[in-house]
Image: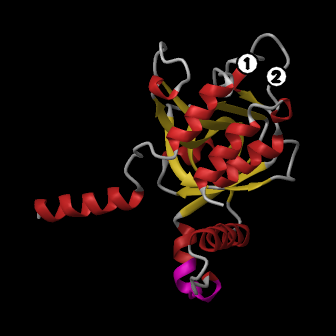
Amino acid sequence: MNRRDVLLGMAFAATAPAAGIADTPEQPAHDSLYIPKAHLVEDRKLLHDFMENYAFVSLVTAAPTIRITHIPVLLDRTAGPYGTVYGHIARNNPQIQTFDGHQQAVIVYQGPNSYISPSWYAKIDVVPTWNFGVVHAGGALKAITDRTALHDLLAKLIKTNESRYTPASTYDFSKIPDSYIGGMIGNVVGFEMQIEMLEGKFKLGQERSEGDRAGILKNLQTAKQDPSIADLTASYYEFLKKKA
């Protein structure tokens, strides 16, 4: 299933009570994200599915200053009440100072987004908006320094992404010489974060009329999309070539 299909499925799922839209009249207390009632999603499986589909995240910490690192992560759905997130960053990254088991972090899973034109609605005397899906996971960061545990984390992360993005690949991490892997492991620090706070915000027009939702889905199929990573890479290579 491609990501557009995932997004369209979420658009329908978020319109139903089973998707976890809160019954309370006001947004419940959340630690990191403003979520109107209509956009709040609490269904844990739906949020976990989203987190696995958009697993390149922003790791945000606030001590001693606000710092953000962009990394791929793994989710263990069964570890703790909301799951546990695993990842690693460079040893030279000052953010490792927060991996003490006490300092709080927020991991932001950013899904697709799109401009929504008023011309797509059944009634067009309205203003445009921007639709998106996002999940925030919060908790305390704990360092993974044991070399065997860190090696296993790297192996699982690589295997997960190889099978997802390059299923025909013959790459085998286990065959990389220990002399190389040992040096690489020495340059990174792993972390685990048991999720204590899980927030989902799907602003996908689910609160609008049936006619408006139909217009959104129809026009998203043909709307101009932002440049892909392939487009960005090619244009930047061309920029570097001209600068040389």
Rendered residue at 84%/29% (across/down)? 17
Rendered residue at 55%/40% (across/down)? 218
The quarter holding residue 161 reads bottom right
**Mark 2 surroundings: few (<14), some (14-19) or many (≥20) residues within 10 A:** some
**x, y percent for residue 241:** 16, 65
The kind of residue on which mark 2 rests is Ala
Q: Which residues are magenta?
A: 174-181
Residue 169 colored magenta?
Answer: no
Task: Tell whether 95 sits left or right of 194.
Answer: left
Which residue occupies the foreground of this view, 91 or 121? 121
Residue 178 colored magenta?
Answer: yes
Disc ID at residue 22: 2
In the displayed structure, would residue 130 be above or below residue 241?
above
The kind of residue on which mark 1 rests is Lys
**x, y percent for residue 213:** 63, 30
Disc ID at residue 37: 1
The residue tagged with tag 2: helix, strand or loop? loop
In the displayed structure, would residue 23 be above or below residue 239?
above
Give the CA distance from mark 2 to mark 1: 6 Å
**x, y percent for residue 18:** 86, 34
The answer to whether residue 102 is visible is no
Which residue occupies the foreground of this view, 215 or 86? 215
Which residue occupies the foreground of this view, 75 or 216? 216
The answer to whether residue 201 is visible is yes
Q: Are marks 2 and 1 in contact (CB under 8 Å)?
A: yes
Rendered residue at 82%/52% (across/down)? 77
In the displayed structure, would residue 72 be above or below residue 57?
below
Magenta segment's dominant SS is helix
Quadrant in which the C terminus is drawn: bottom left
